[in-house]
Image: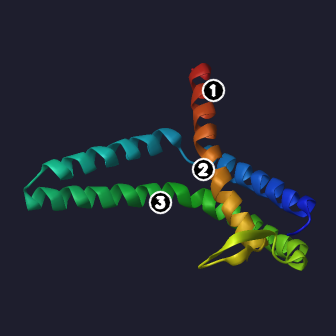
């Protein structure tokens, strides 16, 4: 196992990057519009389950695809803004953490990882974890702040 300071520093960097990415997403995506799209998607899904008429289902599926397309367009702007800095950061992280080899030793042999996880696997695992925690937290705080502003 690698030095705990090495692992800890990578985890802190991962938290910082996840936080920054989630904040950029929250600020650049129109949250009201996104909520409306998500609400309509749920309504369509419920309608599709109830309807037996094939033509109506096809029409609703077309609307569903249209809304998904609009949601992707909303998410694309923050992606383009964060992509270049993230690529630069990955090259820096690789040069820093690659020499340490595997950062986490596993007690079992996992099909894709083997018995150890490198810096990239560690980054990905903690990034997914932090993003899953931070996204709803930032959304909830942002909504609370927006209500106070009104």
Residue of label 3:
72
From mark 2 to mark 3, how far is it between C-alphas?
19 Å
Instruction: Write down the quadrant of residue 150 in the picture.
Output: top right
Q: Is residue 137 above or below residue 54?
A: above
Q: Quadrant of the N terminus?
A: bottom right
Which one is earlier in the sequence, the residue at label 2 or at label 3?
A: 3
Q: Which mark is residue 145?
A: 1
Give the structural element (helix, strand or loop) at label 2.
helix
Query: Which residue reaches farthest front?
Result: 107
Residue of label 2 = 132
Tell me where residue 147 appears, x and y as whole percent: 56, 23
Q: Earlier in the sequence, mark 1 or mark 3?
A: 3
Is the C-beta separation of discs 1 and 3 under 8 Å? no
Please identify the quarter of the rendering in which residue 69 is found. Answer: bottom left
User: Judging from the image, what secondary structure is the residue with disc 3 in?
Assistant: helix
Q: How far apart are the alpha carbons under marks 1 and 3?
A: 26 Å
Q: Count neighbours of disc 3 (C-alpha within 10 A) and say few if under 14, some if 14 to 19, many if 20 or more.
A: few
Residue at the image position 32 percent from the left and 46 percent from the top = 42
Residue 60's x, y, as percent? 21, 55
């Amino acid at each position: 196992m690698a030095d705990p300071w090495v692992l800890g520093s990578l985890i802190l960097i991962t938290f910082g990057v996840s936080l920054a990415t989630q904040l950029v997403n929250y600020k650049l995506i129109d949250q009201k519009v996104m909520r409306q799209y998500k609400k309509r998607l749920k309504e369509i899904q419920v309608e599709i389950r109830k309807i037996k008429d094939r033509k109506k289902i096809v029409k609703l599926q077309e609307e569903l695809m249209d809304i998904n397309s609009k949601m992707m367009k909303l998410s694309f702007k923050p992606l383009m803004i964060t992509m270049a800095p993230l690529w630069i950061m990955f090259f820096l992280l690789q040069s820093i953490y690659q020499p340490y080899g595997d950062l986490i030793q596993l007690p079992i042999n996992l099909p894709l990882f083997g018995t150890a996880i490198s810096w990239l696997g560690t980054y990905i695992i903690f990034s997914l974890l932090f993003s899953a925690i931070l996204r709803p937290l930032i959304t909830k705080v942002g909504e609370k702040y927006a209500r106070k502003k009104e």
